[in-house]
Image: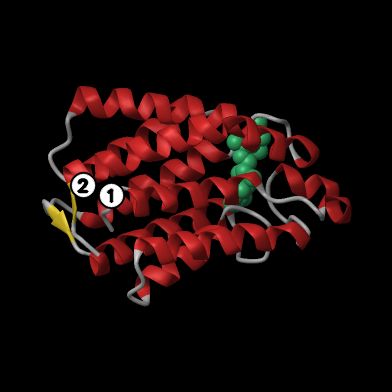
Amino acid sequence: NPALTAAGAREWLQRFATAVDEHAAELTDLDRPIGDSDHGVNLQRGTRAVLAALEAADPPTPGAALTKAGSTLVSTVGGASGPLFGTLLRRTGKALGDSGSVDGAALATGLRAGLDAVVALGGAQVGDATLVDALAPAVEALEAGGSAAEAAEAAERGAASTDDLVARKGRASYLGDRGTGHRDPGAVSIALLFAALAGSGAG
Ligand code: ADP
Ligand code: MG
Ligand code: MG
């Protein structure tokens, strides 16, 4: 895994924004039967604001870039996904500190801090049919020394695992047992985030 630099973090977030644009309609469709049909729109608003904020701030380190991205998501996305994705990136960025270049092990440690913050904020564990079902296995893959591509595959499998789960957090939980048979949109977005990391050649 090549080291993540400030430019690499920018490329990662740029690729994520592009993926969110490409998949916005699909993400919103996933949110229709079990939510309120806004997940793609929510994330798109957030990632566009992130790109503008990075352009304006030109953060000097990967940690600063992720921290700025996270704060921007928290402040621009109303809805559960803004604070959750925002907390993930902000806490990961803070954990990376002010190093100019972050290796795979340090990125895994940073993302673990981000995952822990997401769990502390939202209270969801693996198996609750949320984005945690994609995020936790992706972080574990990196902690085990896996590549970003392997983390992306783990996230994809985790997202697919939500098909048969009963949602216990978020809007989908209002449906109870009737919520099964649907893939969680936030978990699919997390898979896009790790695919973007793999595509950027960093991590
Ligand atoms: P909202 O539900 O407010 O409309 P979004 O549609 O943008 O927000 O995001 C929904 C996604 O947020 C869900 O698919 C799920 O992955 C995630 N989510 C919701 N609540 C939680 C939670 N408590 N913990 C973890 N993830 C959650
Ligand atoms: Mg929604
Ligand atoms: Mg909503």
Q: Secondary structure under badge 2?
A: helix
Q: Look at the picture and state if 38 lies above or below 15.
A: above
Q: What residue type is labelled 2?
A: Pro
Tell me the distance, in whole angstroms, between the alpha carbons under discs 1 and 2: 7 Å
Q: Which corner quadrant of the figure contains ligand 3?
A: top right
Q: Secondary structure under badge 1?
A: helix
Relative to 41, 200 lies left or right: left
* Residue 124 in view (yes/no): no
What residue do we see at 36% from left, 59% from top? Answer: 111
- In the rendered image, residue 4, in percent from the top left (x then y), is placed at 21, 54
Reading the chain from its start, which is encountered first: label 1 or label 2? 2
In front: label 1 or label 2: 2
- According to the picture, the residue beneath numbered tag 2 turns out to be 62
Q: Which of 57 and 182 is in front in this view?
A: 182
Disc ID at residue 93 = 1
Q: What residue type is labelled 1?
A: Gly
Relative to 87, 184 lies left or right: right
What residue do we see at 74% from left, 55% from top? Answer: 167
Disc ID at residue 40 = none
The extreme bottom residue here reads 144
Q: Nearer the viewer, residue 121 or 129?
A: 129
Q: Are marks 1 and 2 in contact (CB under 8 Å)?
A: yes
- In the rendered image, residue 186, in percent from the top left (x then y), is placed at 59, 46
Identify the image quadrant of the C terminus.
bottom left
- In the rendered image, residue 42, in percent from the top left (x then y), is placed at 55, 29
The extreme right residue here reads 178
| Picture quadrant where residue 66 is located | top left
Relative to 13, 194 lies left or right: right
* Residue 51 in view (yes/no): yes
Badge 2 crowding class, 10 Å Cα cut-off, few under 14, some 14 to 19, many 20 or more, is: many
Identify the image quadrant of the N terminus.
bottom left
